[in-house]
Every structure is written in structure tokens, then in C-alpha cells.
Image: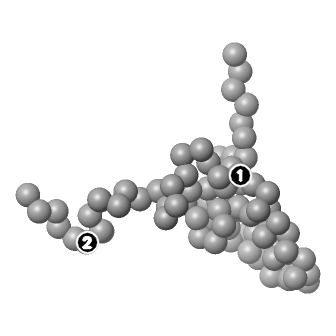
Amino acid sequence: MTMTKKLYKSNDRIIGGVFGGIAEYFGWDKTVVRLIGTLIILFVGQLFLGVLAYFIAMEIMPNRPDYQKGGNHRSDAPIEGEFEEK
């Protein structure tokens, strides 16, 4: 039985998870994909169309099945820099 890859929005989101989801799908670095995607939107000369395409993709792409609102952080986990009480 073969498993098919599916494109989902990333749980590690900056705005909508679109660029992160694309990076996860292809196995690329998320930061690089986000940077390239942002530069393309800003410098192609069609800022409005680029932003519109991003928001359309954000609405069309499904969330991951394991997505929890608020990111992938556990609510009972200590905040970075805090100490756990023992």
C-alpha cells in the first residue's frame, strides 16, 4: 500500500502556514521558503496579487489533521527560560 503525500498548512505558522506547508511537503528549509516567497511577493511588482494569492492559498489549503489552535505547543509546558517546579 502506498502512502500519498498531501499538502497541508504548517502547524509552525508565521501568518497562515502556507509557505511552511510548502516547505514541509518538499522537505525544504522553512525559513528559506518563507524568505523566497516573501521576496517574490514584494519584488515581482504585483504586491496586491501576491498577497491575494497567499490569502486564497491560506483559505484553500487544509489544516493538518493534528492541528491545534495556538500552534504546536503544549499549554502545560514551561515557557522557555522558566524553571519547572519539582
The tally of labels here is 2
Q: Residue at x 59, y 44 (%)?
A: 65
- Residue 77's quadrant in the figure? bottom left
For numbered disc 2, what is the local secondary structure? loop
Q: Is residue 39 above or below residue 19?
A: below
* In-front residue for pair 1/36: 1
Q: Residue at x 74, y 63 (%)?
A: 58
* Residue 53 x, y percent position in the rendering: 85, 69
Callout 2, which amino acid? Gly
Q: Are marks 1 and 2 in contact (CB under 8 Å)?
A: no
For numbered disc 1, what is the local secondary structure? loop
Label ID, residue 81: 2
44 vs 38, left or right, is: right
* Residue 19 x, y percent position in the rendering: 70, 62
The quadrant the N terminus occupies is top right
Label ID, residue 62: 1
Q: Residue at x 58, y 64 (%)?
A: 13
Of labels 1 and 2, the one closer to you: 1
- Residue 74's quadrant in the figure? bottom left
* In-front residue for pair 8/69: 69
